Image (tube, rainbow, N blue to C red):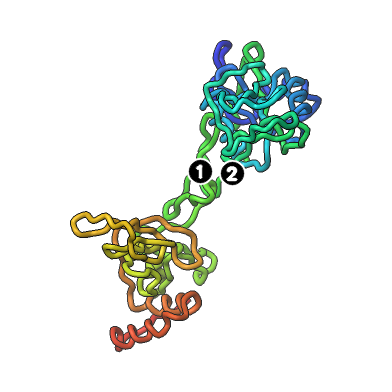
């Protein structure tokens, strides 16, 4: 809730602010907005050239966004994090040639400020005297300031408005109403947080989704209550039936000899490393170190955690795990399809180490 003198940090589309904005902009709707102090920033995914974009922001009672501090820069991550393409900000070269020595390179903010406490130019600044140039940003270029001809159409633009006299009451939007999370959603001031049920963890590649997680040598499988034959295991694990129950057994990927020299099995994954005098290259291969740095007779290498073949990158773990006799057959099937060259190795291993082995039923 906002008071008459200060607005709390609120993210989303604001009840009072948006009614005011849309009324003055003739129905143009912003994709998202963010307010801090008495300033509000909005992003419009509306292809426009620089002049059109600036006029649109003026119609809203503001101007193209100025990024004069690291705080303003951080707001770009919030507004443009899920969008693609270039978006105009309020920085342009009024006339003449750039000044490669100054911080703003001779450019000027649309608010007439020619000074700034923050600069984020893209590498390889073009200091040539060419057509009227303006600045855009995009998530793909990590929000670096990129020069563009002002007449070009960008994917959209960012506006900045001051609501000192307009904002009297702001209501936080409950994003959980739209069910953005796969499991559990918790609404927070200006945002929301996703969490997962027991036996799952948040998917690092998609924070609103959950993936199976074990973190031990074996865990009960996740089975469909309507079909006991449909059971699932986390990446890097193989299922094993024991009576009426199904368990997930960690696969020892080190048996497939995917590492060039040293291998340590971990829960759902494995770690490659090199002997002293060698350096890990390309995640799997060890090459002779040209510039060896010895510490107590050892050469430091950086171990890399790898996922099981064809599976997403798992979390690192602390100790290797064993595989039971029943799960070993499942591992063989897994590696026949992914690493055919290991098949003879496994047959020899089974013949010498498990001559009397009895196998459980496979899924």
Callout 2 secondary element: loop
From the viewer's side, name the closer residue of 44 and 23: 44
Question: Mark 2 sits on what residue?
Answer: 180
Q: Are marks 1 and 2 in contact (CB under 8 Å)?
A: yes
The percent coordinates of residue 102 (x first, y second) are 56, 23
Q: Is residue 196 visible from the viewing direction of this image?
A: yes
Callout 1 secondary element: strand
Residue under the image location 36 percent in, 65 percent down: 287
Question: Mark 1 sits on what residue?
Answer: 194
The percent coordinates of residue 337 (x first, y second) are 50, 77
Residue under the image location 68 percent in, 20 percent down: 110
In the image, is residue 234 above or below residue 158?
Answer: below
Identify the disc placed on residue 229.
none
Residue under the image location 75 percent in, 31 percent down: 131
Local crowd size for mark 1, using a 10 Å CA cut-off: few (<14), some (14–19), many (≥20): some
Q: Name the image quarter holding the N terminus.
A: top right
**Left or right: residue 191 compared with residue 161:** left
The percent coordinates of residue 292 (x first, y second) are 29, 57
In the image, is residue 97 above or below residue 301?
Answer: above
**Left or right: residue 363 compared with residue 300:** right
């Amino acid at each position: 809730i906002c008071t008459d003198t200060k607005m709390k940090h609120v993210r989303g589309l604001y009840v009072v602010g948006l009614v005011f904005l849309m009324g003055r902009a003739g129905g143009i709707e912003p994709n998202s907005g963010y307010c801090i102090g008495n300033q509000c920033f909005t992003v419009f995914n509306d292809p426009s050239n620089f002049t059109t974009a600036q006029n649109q922001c003026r119609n809203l009672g503001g101007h193209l966004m100025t990024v004069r501090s690291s705080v303003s820069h951080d707001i770009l991550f919030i507004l443009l994090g899920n969008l693609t393409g270039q978006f105009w900000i309020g920085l342009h070269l009024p006339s003449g040639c750039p000044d490669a020595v100054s911080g703003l390179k001779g450019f000027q903010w649309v608010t007439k400020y020619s000074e700034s406490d923050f600069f984020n130019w893209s590498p390889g600044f073009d200091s040539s005297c060419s057509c009227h140039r303006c600045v855009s940003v995009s998530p793909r270029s990590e929000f670096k300031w990129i020069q563009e001809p002002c007449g070009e159409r960008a994917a959209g633009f960012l506006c900045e408005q001051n609501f000192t006299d307009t904002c009297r009451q702001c209501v936080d939007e409950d994003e959980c109403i739209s069910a953005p999370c796969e499991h559990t959603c918790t609404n927070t001031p200006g945002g929301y947080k996703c969490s997962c049920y027991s036996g799952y963890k948040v998917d690092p590649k998609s924070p609103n989704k959950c993936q199976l997680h074990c973190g031990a040598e074996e865990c009960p499988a996740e089975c469909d209550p309507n079909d006991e034959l449909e059971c699932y295991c986390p990446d890097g694990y193989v299922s094993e039936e024991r009576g009426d129950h199904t368990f997930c057994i960690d696969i020892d990927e080190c048996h497939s000899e995917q590492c060039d020299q040293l291998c340590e099995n971990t829960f759902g994954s494995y770690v490659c490393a090199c002997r002293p005098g060698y350096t890990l290259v390309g995640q799997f291969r060890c090459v002779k170190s040209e510039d060896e740095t010895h510490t107590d007779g050892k050469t430091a290498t950086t171990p890399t955690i790898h996922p099981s073949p064809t599976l997403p990158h798992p979390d690192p773990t602390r100790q290797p795990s064993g595989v039971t006799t029943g799960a070993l057959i499942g591992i063989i099937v897994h590696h026949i399809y992914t690493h055919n060259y290991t098949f003879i190795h496994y047959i020899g291993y089974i013949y010498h180490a498990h001559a009397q082995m009895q196998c459980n039923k496979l899924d």
